[in-house]
Image (tube, rainbow, N blue to C red):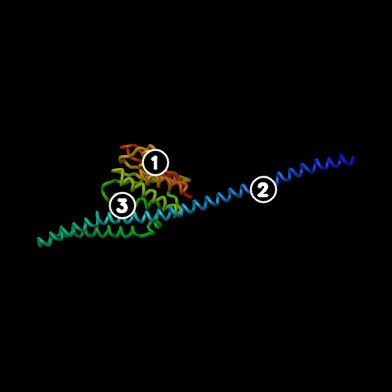
Amino acid sequence: MQHDQDWEVLFVIIPSIIIFFALSSAIVFFMLYFQKKKFQYVKEKNEREKQFAEQLLQSRLEMQEQTFDSISQEIHDNVGQLLSLAKLQLSIVEQKEINDKGLIADIKGNIGNALTDLRDIAKSLSTSRIQQLTLLQAVEQELQRIGRSGTITCNVEVTGNEQPIAEQKKIIIFRIVQESLQNILKHAAAKNIAVGFNFLSEALSISITDDGIGFSTDENAKAESGLGLQNIIKRSELIMGKATISSTVNHGTKIILTIPYV
């Protein structure tokens, strides 16, 4: 009788011990698993933050470089030509030794325009310029600068109510737009640029369209298109957005950026 009771106790204890160790092992396994997942998440988060910081610095440097290039071009094309014309007009007045009020008024006008351009250029040199403007204002100023060349027409269309965007994200978005515009100026041979801002409830959609020569979107052509388009896509992904690029040879290019506000 006692022997049977001992066996009954063993039949109860042994499965209990097995179940206890199985549960303990499962708990330890899941703890290690979730700890590993947490470690991977923290590591990936730190990597994303590192990439974001690097891209932010790179965007700032590229914006400064682009600003200096633009200033150099504007001084040469606009200010330089105006002052050269004023100098030529002064030479005419000096040679003729006459008091031509109309010509003198033209000289004053050209010098005044040159001074206005120089003031605008001085403002654009400010490193805090982008911080003081909304994204829409910054892009509008960039398009105005491009349009002053007289070789290309720029238009902006806005849909919805403008939403605030985090400062660091705004800088990267502006650089994406700026790089898209520079690609058009360098490669598209376009006559018109249209930029659309669509302020949706959860995200901002920006379209950049040109009527230039376009390009083939097959894989080989993409590989040959340089780093410009790749940078646009990578930077969009870095700020949790998406860039869609569509183009047809001789029918222009359209880039659509969809970027969440936060």
Sequence-wise first label, 1 or 3: 3
Mark 1: give few (<14), some (14-19) or many (20+) Cα within 10 Å: some
User: Label 2's element?
Assistant: helix
| Residue type, label 1 | Ile
Q: CA distance from mark 3 to mark 2?
A: 63 Å
- The alpha-carbon separation of the residues under discs 2 and 1 comes to 48 Å
Asked whether disc 2 touches disc 1, contact meaning CB atoms under 8 Å apart, the reply is no
Q: Position of 148 compared to 90: left or right?
A: right
**Residue at the extreme right:** 1
Residue 10, given in percent of the width and then of the height, sits at 81, 42
Q: Are marks 1 and 3 in contact (CB under 8 Å)?
A: no
Residue 192: x and y in percent read 30, 43
Sequence-wise first label, 2 or 1: 2
Which is closer to the viewer, label 3 or label 2? 2
Residue wearing tag 3: 145
Of labels 2 and 1, the one closer to you: 2
Mark 3 residue type: Arg
Q: Amino acid at mark 2?
A: Val
- Please tell me in which quadrant of the rendered image residue 81 appears: bottom left
Residue 179 position in % (x across, y down): 36, 49
| Circle 2 residue | 28
Residue picked out by circle 1? 245
Query: Who's the residue at 39% across and 51% down the image?
Result: 175
How many numbered marks does the figure carry?
Answer: 3
Q: Is residue 12 above or below residue 65?
A: above
Q: Which label is found at residue 52?
A: none
Task: Please report whichever mark, 3 or 2, sits nearer to the chain's N-terminal start.
Answer: 2
**Label 2, residues with CA under 10 Å away: few <14, some 14-19, many ≥20:** few
